[in-house]
Amino acid sequence: MQFIPYGKQQLDQSDIDAVVETLHSDYLTTGPKVKEFEEAIAAYVGSAYCVAVANGTAALHLASLVLLSKDEKVLTTPNSFLATSNAILYAGAKPVFVDIAEDGNIDLDLCKEELKKDPSIKAIYAVAFSGRMIDQEKLKYLRETYNIIILEDCAHAIGAKDGEVKAASCVNSDISILSFHPVKHMTTGEGGAITTNSREVYEKLITLRGHGMVKTPEMKPWEYEMQMLGFNYRITDIQCALGLSQLKKLDRFIERRIEIARKYDQAFENSIVKPLYSYDEKSSYHLYVVQVDFTLLNISKEDLFNTLREKSIGIQLHYIPINKQPYYKSLGYGNEFTPVMDRYYKECFSLPMYPVLSDEEQKYVINTLFEVLK
Ligand SMILES: Cc1ncc(COP(=O)(O)O)c(C=O)c1O
């Protein structure tokens, strides 16, 4: 059996053709494909504006420079990739880690408690973990009641919906971000995007993406003005050509992910392997996470990982609690009361989930997992 990773891209000839066509064009970067891609992403997620950038981390960085000021407190989740809370630090602000709920997303009820206790909290950075939508009713309530800034990290969640609200549409948030890393739903190699419904935020993001530089029609032909300290976080036309081609297939990719999720759900019914949540239309399944109580078994998590790797199955752990990382500990984090996250970290792991995972491969994963856990 060929190695089965937890995630990978699906590319076909039309993706390659799209990239080659752009390589033959006049623009490799700052050309028409970037704008076309941004408009297509905004139309897909239902936001007014989109700024495409070099990667999801750059998207979080720029978003944080627009949303946050130094020393402001931001409620966020320990269950994410490092980039989510790192971006809060980039802006000189202070992450406050809140425990997760049973579905792996930040517990918005606990966020409410924190907001009641501390009116100085400025924002919530919530992650639609594994592709499952952040509860939009609760988000709306918190935003309206406590007048806080909301960022939705939708790096896992393009294509997900909660009722009528689509991931990254920013109906109940100020900014959302996306990532187009190859393990995500669609890829540009590296790449990311920021979506918003605010013209003012959009314009600031565009300026920050390009060195803080502004050029207006009134200026002399050679003139440009640096108005803020920005970066080169541009994405290329080559990447955007790939993104446009991938976007055409995104709904199909997600349908296939859902099909795989339902098969896993069925296979694990009434077994010791518990899906983090069962299919209920609210997830676009970047990850399929399961929970196993290792205290009931004769195998440790480490042995399970190693044995499955020997059998060509690359399960993965998403995520090690960010607040327990050495760097965060050096800043004084790590002792937050997060019992749900602690249990999650002991019990959870992600199974292979990507559109080109074949039925045979999935059966092999399920059977081997049961065999090893027996
Ligand atoms: C939840 C989340 N946010 C942000 C990022 C950063 O995205 P990128 O890898 O494109 O920089 C990732 C990447 O894995 C992620 O999983």
Image: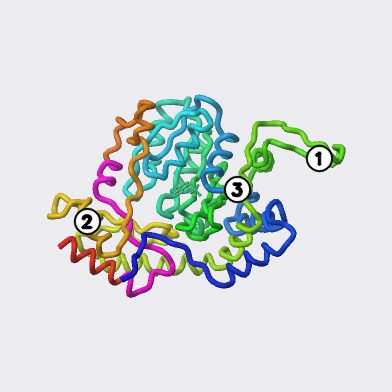
Report the residue marked by disc 3: 53
Dot 2 corresponds to which residue?
304
Tell me which corner region of the image, top left, top right, bottom left or bottom right, holds residue 333. Answer: top left
Q: Identify the residue at image location x=56%, y=28%.
A: 69
Q: Within 8 Å of ligand 1, the CB of disc 2?
A: no
Q: Where 172 falls versus 26 (above or below)?
A: above
Amino acid type of the residue tagged 1 in the rendering:
Thr
What's the distance in space between the residues labelled 2 and 1, CA to CA? 59 Å
Tell me, yes or no, whether the highlighted magenta stretch contains residue 342: yes
Foreground: 14 or 138? 14
Q: Position of residue 290 (x, y in %)?
A: 29, 56
Q: Residue at x 40, y 44 (%)?
A: 80
Residue 111, compared with residue 166, is above or below; it is above
Tag 3: residue type? Val
Quick one: label 1, few (<14), some, or many (20+) residues within 10 Å?
few
The x and y percentages for residue 328 are 38, 32
Q: Which residue is mark 1?
A: 216
Q: Alpha-carbon neighbours of circle 2 within 10 Å: few (<14), some, or many (≥20)?
A: some
* Color theme of the render: rainbow
Q: Residue at x 45, y 57 (%)?
A: 183
Mark 3 or mark 2, which has the lower sequence index? 3
Please report the bounds of the magenta region as a residue range: 340-362
- Describe the element under mark 1 as helix, strand or loop: loop
Task: Please identify, in this view, whether the residue under mark 2 or under mark 1 is nearer the observer.
Answer: 2
